[in-house]
Image: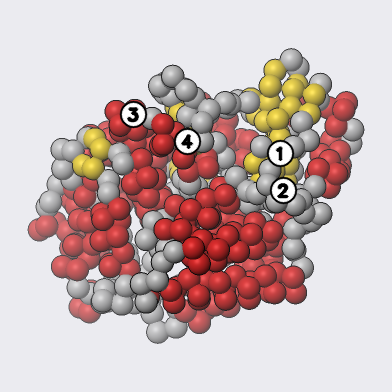
Amino acid sequence: MADEELDEIHHRWGQRALSTGRIAASAVRLAGRRLVGAEGDADRLLGERLARELDGMKGLAMKVGQILSYFDGVLPAETHEALRKLQKGARPVAFETMRQEIEEAFGEPVSALFEAFDDTPVAAASIGQVYRARFERREVAVKVQYPHVEKTFEADFGRIRSLARLASLATAVDGVAIADELRARVTEECDYLREAAWQAAFRAAFADDPRIVIPEVVQARTRRTVLTTAWAAGDDFYAFVEGAPAARRHEVGLLLARFALRSLFGLGTLNADPHPGNYLFPRDEGHVVFLDFGCVRRFEPDFLETERALVDVVIHDRRAAFRDAVMATGMIPQPRKFDFDVHWDMLRHQYAPYGQPRFRFTPEYVQAGAKFSGPSNPNLRRLAIPPAWIWVQRLLWGLHAVQVRLGAEGAFRDVMEEALATRLPPLAVPA
């Protein structure tokens, strides 16, 4: 791993406030350069500075950086490239610090817990680091949580909640409820026993599809702050995109869509972190390895049914039924002031990949969608957004951003139709 090791992450309020200030300064400079059309090495240098700061903070800050790294068009291209390193991390926490976490979790030394343990992490992510080890004569991946990482959420979400309260003034949006929803999901990620249970549930749910591989959890070496799974090998996302033929990339695009949409509409449960660092692509094999089940959201049946009906109306171009389908969602508290034509155009664009026989994802498609999030959209301050809806949007925009990177093309409508028609038993909520 490049760069120096960290003894610990910044978890105290003052430390994180200082880092947040530096991040804000870099972001303002990047935004300013983008507005005036400036591009070049300065964008890369600013991006590297931003990545370094986010990497040192870990937690929510690093997670936001991961999201920005693959949403093309949000920042200059050179900045996106610099932020990519956040998907695996470049500044690991020192192993001696992480060793203590393992030994405190099990009450035994690492040498007694594993037959072999490589102390160089293979990934340093937002909440924990991943190591390669051997247990009971097989290779395993060991994810170890950073010490004090939960305290970083207390510091970060305190500020986010205050900002959300101000941002939602004079709107129908309950910003505090959304902030609390985000906090609940991210806090759950710190419980690796819960993640292990979700991973096992998803593995069982997709056992009928050999193209979707979810590593087995090693329960004997899993605790609340340590998660051990079977080792999975494969190229990372960017190596795959660079080296795979177009036909394979198209195949993978359809597979990623099937996993996401079947999870949402079939299982009523969403693995809500579809960033490129959570996939592996074994060479010369037709499957994809899906990693990281820490951020999972389960949906109420009523919410899913209204979303299912709305999507069905949009992808089949049934404009006459649109108003009733939107009203059924409960997101329009004042229909007289709502522009249903603009909302129709927005959803027709968002679901365009699923409304035609074949679709090719392009940067222009994602960039065109950004206009619906700007001030020209008269409905933005008139939507009563339920927290659950945020995760559906994150799924779609995250999935579509990944598809653009793949240059994916295919019959995505068939995948959506299959997902809408699938009703499987919902996954059990981990205790």
**At 24% from the left edge and 51% from the top edge, which residue is drawn?**
351
Q: For the residues labelled 1 and 2, say whether their Cβ atoms are less than 8 Å apart.
A: yes
Q: Residue furthest bottom?
A: 170
Q: Secondary structure at mark 2?
A: loop
Residue 330: x and y in percent read: 32, 64
Circle 2 residues within 10 Å: few <14, some 14–19, many ≥20? many
Q: For the residues labelled 4 and 3, say whether their Cβ atoms are less than 8 Å apart.
A: no
Q: Secondary structure at mark 3?
A: loop
Q: Secondary structure at mark 4?
A: helix
Q: For the residues labelled 2 and 3, say whether their Cβ atoms are less than 8 Å apart.
A: no
Q: Tag 3 or tag 1, which sits nearer the N-term?
A: 1
Q: Tag 1 or tag 4, which sits nearer the N-term?
A: 1
Circle 3 residues within 10 Å: few <14, some 14–19, many ≥20? few
Give the number of marks.
4
Which amino acid is tagged 3?
A: Pro
In the depicted structure, whether residue 61 falls above or below residue 363: below
Residue 4 or residue 304, whichever sits in front:
4
Disc number for residue 121: 1
Reading the image, the residue beneath label 4 is 239
How many angstroms separate mark 2 from mark 3 (CA)?
33 Å
Which amino acid is tagged 2?
A: Pro
Residue 424 or residue 296, whichever sits in front:
296
How many angstroms separate mark 1 from mark 3 (CA)?
30 Å
In the depicted structure, whether residue 168 falls above or below residue 89: below
**At 49% from the left edge and 63% from the top edge, which residue is drawn?**
41
Q: Residue furthest left?
A: 320
Reading the image, the residue beneath label 2 is 92
Which amino acid is tagged 1?
A: Pro
How many angstroms separate mark 1 from mark 2 (CA)?
7 Å
Circle 1 residues within 10 Å: few <14, some 14–19, many ≥20? many
Reading the image, the residue beneath label 3 is 245
